């Protein structure tokens, strides 16, 4: 990361926060992951906050609303773009489908222009840190600053002398939905709605966002605008209106449409500041106003920015690291920052929230969460939450169980109380089962188990979670010919592998709860992956309806997210070793330990491993299942961290997936990884730091903090010579969660 940006960042916050002791917030660089399709952004947000305020630069003067799909724009911000068209409110972080990112606030100077294709500006002097973002719009000389509370934002615009404008664009956005309404409330306030949804092109998953916008100064003029329709060649007399925006000066009644907006104009003195507040809700306009009123008492930008900083400091202080380089610390704490953006708090300050797949509202006295990208996060983010933030994890799991009570199904990929049906499997099972097996309590596990057993046994015609379960049960596998609910194609092997893993986690949970026959049943089902193993290709291979293997077959087809029969967003090599619940059994299929290890090593040597593809991200840790091969895990993890995780804008290897890529880095840098979701174990590797201290919540972990230490004398030391936990020598490179929290002190001697 260039030094200039860090200087700007530090200078900006000296004025906002004042000089003080260095804390972990200072190591976070929100520009990491803002290119390379990582889908992160440098905007302002609180930990798990509903509100985020993000610079919007994905549509420039040469782009239009549709280009974000043609060019796979799934982020409101891309580091290499330089055309700013406003601040978007309520966005997603690390999500691979275009959604949200609307209600754009844009300051301009001069004559009023409401066409985003020409009112946008290049910018300079970007600064960002958790809870704060600022830049200068070079076209206008306007300094912009934004910060946020949990459900509202405040923005400060410093204008030069002249005519200044504030534009509130309700038409453009990252979402594929259209439609908005607004109403003027007073000289300094307006309110409205914006339709959102159709995530990953699911036409049913839509929902409204309600908002209230307030400014601290009365404008000299105000009004609304609306884009005129294209009347076509049949009405040439209307040609002058085609593609143009019509202004409605002084209009203060209701307006609705697909491309509308509100403007305010000021006669500015040099350096005059105008502040804007936005409150949002997914229940009602009244709740949006209450959220704003309760979370901000008047206009106080600096106090709000300070509170955001303090909340992030508390969140990031769960881990203290010693040693390592400055770059490694920036990578680590930025990853921890990214891991704590989603899931997102959904309920309003009065406790109301939209019920799952319902037109009714519910009410809670705790936190109701949304944005559950479970196919991604059950692999490592769930385990990170259980370890470092168990209080939040309990609330998240309770949110998932409440969704089941409201709807009849656990969430799969839930977004603002709508199910999007994105990706494979039955991911709530390993997510929740893993937390329970690591000792977490405070949620109704019996109700969760009932939901799990239903989705694992109900026939396909009745089963919304596993519509292709019938052949899975009768044959032990899913043949080609079943198409995914998210319209991604025929992903039979990917589906089945997810079911195998989920059923193994369910088997472990069933045994813990005393359901012995279920434990045996689901464990047996989880071993069905063996049907897919082809000795000819040496990989898992799709099976036709008649039981024969797909022919012809190329194990490398599907790489780089190309379409490939049987596999979703990956090749056979990205999936073949994804049997973490039976690694030794898979090795036997492959001809023994040596052939397994050699083949796995070949995946890395030939570049077949994809560090941004969830099914294979645990591959480096599989070497450690075999005595004498653990060094391969230590070397491979070290090499991958150095190559793919840096403090540059492209410093995440691909789609962040709401914290999954970052969680891989966090665990790997600390020296342990949960490679088998549902099973409460970690595989150990070499930490990058000399000492890591995990400050555990005593309400959940009464034994107190955990330390992971090395005797590193040189940065070149990669391999582990011996280890102790609680003073007792370890004979294995795998330890249980119980061993870790009770042993407290994990010490590694390096060679």
Image (tube, rainbow, N blue to C red):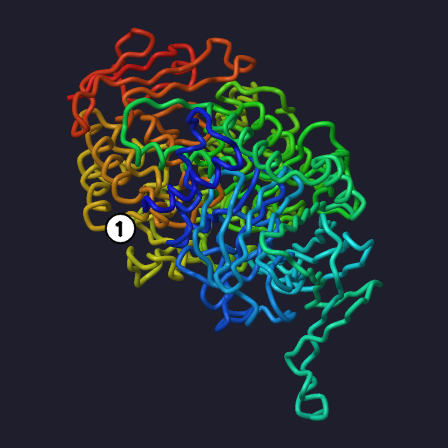
Which image quadrant: the C terminus? top left
Place of residue 374 in the rendered image (x, y in percent of width and height, measured from the top left): 52, 41
326 or 530: which is nearer to us? 326
From this viewpoint, which residue is outermost toward the right?
Answer: 253
Q: Where is residue 190 in the image (x, y as percent from the top left)?
A: 77, 54
Residue at 34% x, 52% y is: 541
In what element is the residue under mark 1? Answer: loop
Residue 248 visible in the picture? yes
- Quick one: 238 or 453, which is closer to the camera? 238
**Foreground residue among 41 and 499:** 41
The residue that appears at 33% across and 48% down in the rendered structure is 574
Indicate the position of residue 662 as horizontal and vertical percent values.
41, 38
Q: State whether residue 367 is above or below residue 247.
A: above
**Which residue in the structure is indicated by mark 1?**
608
User: Quadrant location of residue 355?
Assistant: top right
**Camera-nearest residue between 652 and 492:** 652
Q: How many marks?
A: 1
| 280 sits left or right of 575 in the view | right
Drawn side of residue 556 relative to residue 475, left or right = left
Residue 211 visible here: no
Q: Residue pushed farthest top?
A: 727
Q: In this view, does 535 lie to the left or right of 182?
A: left
Q: Quadrant of the N terminus?
A: top left
Image coordinates of residue 88 in percent, x first then y, are 59, 54
Q: Residues within 10 Å of mark 1 (few under 14, many from 20)?
A: some
Tell me if 150 is positioned left or right of 329 in this view: right
Quarter of the image for residue 107 reads bottom right
């Amino acid at each position: 990361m260039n030094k200039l940006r860090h200087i700007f960042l530090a200078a900006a916050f000296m004025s906002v926060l004042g000089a003080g002791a260095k804390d972990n917030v200072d190591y976070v660089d929100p520009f990491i992951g803002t290119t390379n399709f990582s889908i992160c952004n440098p905007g302002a947000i609180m930990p798990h906050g509903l509100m985020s305020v993000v610079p919007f630069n994905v549509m420039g003067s040469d782009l239009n609303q549709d280009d974000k799909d043609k060019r796979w724009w799934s982020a409101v911000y891309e580091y290499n773009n330089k055309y700013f068209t406003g601040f978007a409110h309520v966005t997603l972080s690390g999500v691979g489908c275009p959604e949200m990112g609307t209600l754009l606030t844009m300051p301009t100077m001069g004559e009023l222009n409401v066409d985003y294709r020409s009112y946008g500006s290049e910018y300079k002097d970007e600064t960002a840190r958790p809870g704060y973002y600022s830049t200068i719009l070079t076209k206008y000389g306007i300094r912009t600053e934004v910060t946020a509370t949990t459900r509202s934002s405040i923005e400060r615009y410093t204008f030069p002398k002249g005519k200044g404008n504030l534009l509130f664009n309700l038409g453009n956005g990252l979402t594929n939905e259209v439609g908005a309404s607004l109403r003027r409330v007073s000289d300094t306030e307006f309110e409205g709605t914006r339709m959102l949804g159709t995530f990953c092109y699911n036409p049913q998953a839509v929902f409204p966002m309600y908002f209230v916008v307030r400014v601290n100064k009365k404008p000299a003029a105000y009004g609304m605008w609306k884009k005129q329709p294209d009347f076509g060649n049949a009405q040439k007399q209307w040609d002058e209106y085609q593609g143009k925006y019509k202004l409605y000066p002084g209009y203060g009644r209701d307006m609705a449409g697909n491309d509308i907006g509100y403007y305010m104009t000021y006669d500015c003195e040099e350096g005059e500041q105008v502040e804007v507040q936005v409150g949002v809700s997914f229940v009602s306009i009244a709740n949006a106003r209450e959220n704003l009123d309760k979370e901000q008492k008047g206009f106080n930008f600096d106090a709000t920015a300070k509170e955001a900083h303090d909340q992030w400091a508390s969140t990031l202080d769960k881990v203290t690291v010693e040693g390592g380089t400055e770059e490694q610390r920036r990578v680590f704490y930025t990853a921890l920052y990214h891991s704590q953006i989603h899931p997102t708090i959904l309920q309003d300050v009065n406790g109301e929230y939209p019920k799952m797949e319902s037109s009714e509202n519910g009410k809670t006295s705790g936190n109701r969460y949304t944005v559950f990208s479970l196919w991604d996060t059950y692999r490592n983010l769930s385990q990170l939450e259980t370890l470092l933030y168990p209080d939040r994890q309990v609330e998240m799991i309770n949110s998932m169980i409440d969704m089941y009570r409201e709807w009849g199904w656990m969430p799969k990929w839930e977004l603002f109380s709508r199910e999007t049906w994105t990706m494979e499997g039955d991911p709530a099972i390993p997510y929740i089962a893993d937390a329970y097996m690591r000792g977490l309590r405070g949620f109704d596990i019996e109700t969760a188990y009932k939901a799990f057993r239903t989705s694992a046994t109900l026939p396909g015609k009745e089963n919304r979670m596993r519509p292709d379960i019938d052949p899975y049960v009768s044959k032990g596998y899913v043949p080609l010919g079943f198409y995914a609910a998210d319209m991604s194609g025929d992903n039979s092997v990917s589906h089945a592998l997810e079911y195998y893993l989920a059923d193994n986690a369910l088997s472990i949970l069933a045994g813990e709860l005393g359901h012995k026959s279920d434990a045996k049943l689901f464990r047996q089902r989880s071993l069905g992956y063996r049907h897919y193993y082809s000795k000819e290709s040496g990989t898992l291979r799709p099976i036709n309806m008649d039981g024969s293997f797909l022919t012809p077959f190329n194990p490398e087809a599907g790489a780089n997210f190309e379409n490939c029969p049987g596999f979703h967003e990956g090749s056979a090599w990205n999936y073949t070793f994804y049997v973490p619940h039976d690694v030794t059994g898979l090795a036997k299929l492959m001809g023994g330990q040596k052939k397994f290890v050699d083949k796995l090593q070949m995946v890395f040597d030939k570049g077949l491993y994809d560090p941004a593809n969830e099914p294979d991200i645990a591959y480096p840790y599989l070497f450690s299942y075999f005595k004498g091969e653990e060094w391969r895990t230590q070397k491979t993890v070290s090499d991958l961290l150095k190559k793919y995780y840096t403090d540059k804008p492209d410093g995440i290897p691909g789609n962040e997936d709401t914290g999954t890529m970052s969680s891989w880095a966090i665990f790997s840098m600390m020296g342990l990884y949960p490679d088998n979701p549902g099973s409460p174990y970690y595989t150990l590797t070499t930490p990058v730091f000399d000492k890591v201290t995990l400050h555990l919540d005593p309400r959940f972990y009464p034994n107190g903090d955990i330390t992971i230490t090395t005797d590193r004398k040189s940065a070149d030391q990669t391999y582990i010579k011996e280890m102790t936990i609680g003073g007792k020598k370890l004979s294995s490179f795998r330890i249980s969660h119980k061993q870790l929290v009770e042993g407290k002190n994990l010490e590694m001697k390096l060679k």
